[in-house]
């Protein structure tokens, strides 16, 4: 076993393993600590020089084993010399002055995110985009990438999402960037939906393992809001007020994403006059917080109450717990059996569908046994209740009743979800099984769809 036996091809093979396994797993496998001074710089990425050199020895052939830390007796200078003699660049861990190009793994996550939310990409100050930027930095860190102080920050990640528009045939503009398409971007963009979801899921699994093994990624704080009241809440020493600020900012994000005005209405003035605790308590008592529309975010006045039960009356705590249970019932799901169960429960609670639910203009997709959309049970239940047992296309009664006594109708999306249709009550109709099949497969299905739209006006 000698360092002099190692070839450039073996080093490149070790770098490839580093990329696939991630820094933490790679170092743990070969028993090395992270480099504190010198790093191998190869193809825009940084690698722990001694660990890569040790792993490379095992790639020389079946009779060779990887070198462990105890096999390096000559210190870092020997490691540096061997790598430089093989034509590699070794650097003394300098701060980067530019950010590296996006890798395939990062582009897979970005393309999945884009397809999920287009055409309404979450803004760069939203929790959704900030959390996604954290995920992108984790994927980059796993591959040994580093950059300057703007490395994969929300602004940069948002810009990359805007650049992806140049590949989107449904986008009428030209995208943010005029640069020619990159081969790697095109290759990822052309992945079919199932391939994309599987690849993204595998990357997220590696990220979870990396973080579970103590891996660290630089976090970026959410930008301060423009509202003076929200800024005061964020800077307060009171954890209730801090959480209230986050809840209200998430509420604004949701309204923007839904194409609505993102104002906070009377809330800031009431908080300023009466205090955060009073306003939260009144909204929860009156069951008028409005956060049933954003139950999927897990952010609400009710959650503040449950998180801080000592600050509110027992009656308010109980109301909050009941409302959170209702929010859980309304969470979208991609499981058809669970959707049916939730819909049945909601139909037995007319109070939950006394008004049309907001639904979701961009329903999330996920990978089950097949690619599936996360459907909102409130939307299904409201649509079924609105039909009152009659097919909204042919106007005949449901063909039979289910075991629970409710009429059997199927919920149809007028503009299919797969074509970008929203999961909202305006885009849904309750139809009999025969009409449902006809809407999908009949020769005159387009005419039937137009008739259904006109009857729902």
Image (spheres, rainbow, N blue to C red):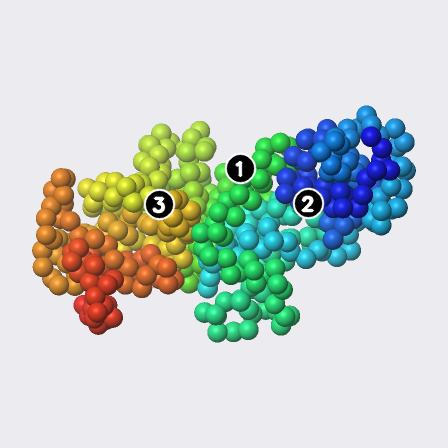
The disc label shown at residue 16, or none: 2
Q: Decide: marks 1, 3 in contact (CB < 8 A)?
A: no
Q: Would residue 314 be found to the left or right of residue 98 on screen?
A: left
Which residue sits at x=60%, y=36%? 211
Q: Earlier along the polypeptide chain: callout 3 or callout 2?
A: 2
Task: Please determine whether, in this image, residue 318 is positioned above or below residue 93.
Answer: above
Which residue sits at x=14%, y=43%? 402
Q: Residue 51 in the image: x percent, y percent?
A: 76, 36
Which residue sits at x=54%, y=52%? 109
Neighbourhood count class around disc 2 (C-alpha, 10 Å): few under 14, some 14–19, many 20 upward:
some
Instruction: Please identify the quadrant where the C terminus is shown.
Output: bottom left
Which residue sits at x=73%, y=49%? 45
Q: Residue 173 in the image: x percent, y percent?
A: 52, 74
The disc label shown at residue 239, or none: 1
Q: Earlier along the polypeptide chain: callout 1 or callout 3?
A: 1
> Considering the numbered disc 3 on the image, is that residue within a helix, a strand or a loop?
loop
Q: Earlier along the polypeptide chain: callout 1 or callout 2?
A: 2
Residues under labels 1 and 3: Cα distance? Answer: 32 Å
Instruction: Please identify the quadrant where the N terminus is shown.
Output: top right
> Considering the numbered disc 1 on the image, is that residue within a helix, a strand or a loop?
helix
The disc label shown at residue 333, or none: 3
Q: Decide: marks 3, 2 in contact (CB < 8 A)?
A: no
Nearer the observer, 357 or 225: 357
How many numbered markers are drawn? 3
């Amino acid at each position: 076993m000698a360092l002099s036996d190692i070839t450039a091809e073996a080093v490149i093979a070790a770098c490839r393993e580093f990329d696939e396994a991630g820094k933490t797993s790679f170092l743990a496998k070969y028993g090395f600590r992270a480099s504190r001074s010198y790093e191998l710089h190869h193809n825009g990425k940084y690698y722990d020089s001694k660990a890569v050199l040790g792993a490379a020895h095992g790639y020389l052939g079946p009779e060779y084993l990887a070198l462990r830390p105890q096999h390096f007796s000559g210190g870092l200078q020997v490691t540096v010399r061997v790598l430089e003699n093989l034509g590699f660049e070794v650097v003394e861990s300098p701060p980067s002055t530019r950010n590296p190009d996006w890798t395939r793994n990062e582009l897979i996550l970005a393309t999945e995110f884009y397809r999920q939310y287009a055409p309404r990409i979450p803004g760069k100050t939203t929790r959704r985009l900030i959390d996604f930027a954290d995920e992108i930095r984790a994927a980059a860190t796993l591959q040994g990438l580093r950059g300057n102080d703007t490395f994969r920050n929300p602004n940069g990640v948002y810009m990359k999402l805007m650049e992806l528009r140049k590949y989107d045939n449904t986008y009428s503009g030209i995208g943010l960037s005029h640069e020619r398409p990159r081969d790697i971007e095109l290759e990822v963009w052309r992945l079919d939906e199932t391939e994309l979801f599987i690849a993204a899921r595998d990357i997220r699994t590696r990220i979870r393992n990396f973080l579970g093994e103590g891996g660290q990624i630089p976090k970026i704080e959410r930008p301060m809001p423009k509202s003076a009241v929200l800024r005061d809440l964020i800077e307060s020493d009171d954890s209730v007020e801090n959480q209230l600020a986050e809840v209200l900012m998430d509420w604004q994000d949701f309204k923007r994403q839904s194409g609505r005005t993102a104002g906070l209405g009377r809330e800031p003035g009431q908080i300023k006059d009466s205090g955060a605790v009073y306003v939260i308590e009144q909204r929860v008592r009156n069951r008028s917080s409005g956060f049933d529309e954003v139950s999927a975010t897990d952010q609400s006045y009710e959650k503040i109450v449950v998180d801080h039960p000592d600050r509110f009356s027992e009656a308010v705590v109980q109301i909050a717990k009941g409302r959170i249970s209702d929010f859980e019932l309304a969470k979208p799901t991609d499981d058809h059996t669970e959707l049916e169960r939730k819909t049945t429960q909601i139909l037995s609670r007319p109070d939950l569908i006394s008004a049309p639910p907001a639904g979701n203009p961009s329903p999330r997709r996920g990978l089950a046994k097949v690619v599936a959309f996360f459907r909102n049970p409130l939307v299904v239940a409201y649509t079924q209740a609105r039909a009152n047992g009659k097919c909204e296309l042919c106007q005949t009664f449901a063909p039979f009743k289910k075991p629970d006594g409710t009429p059997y109708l199927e919920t149809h999306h007028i503009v299919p979800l797969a074509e970008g249709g929203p999961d909202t009550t305006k885009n849904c109709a309750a139809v009999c099984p025969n009409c449902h099949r006809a809407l999908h497969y009949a020769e005159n299905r387009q005419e039937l769809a137009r008739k259904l739209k006109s009857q729902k006006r």
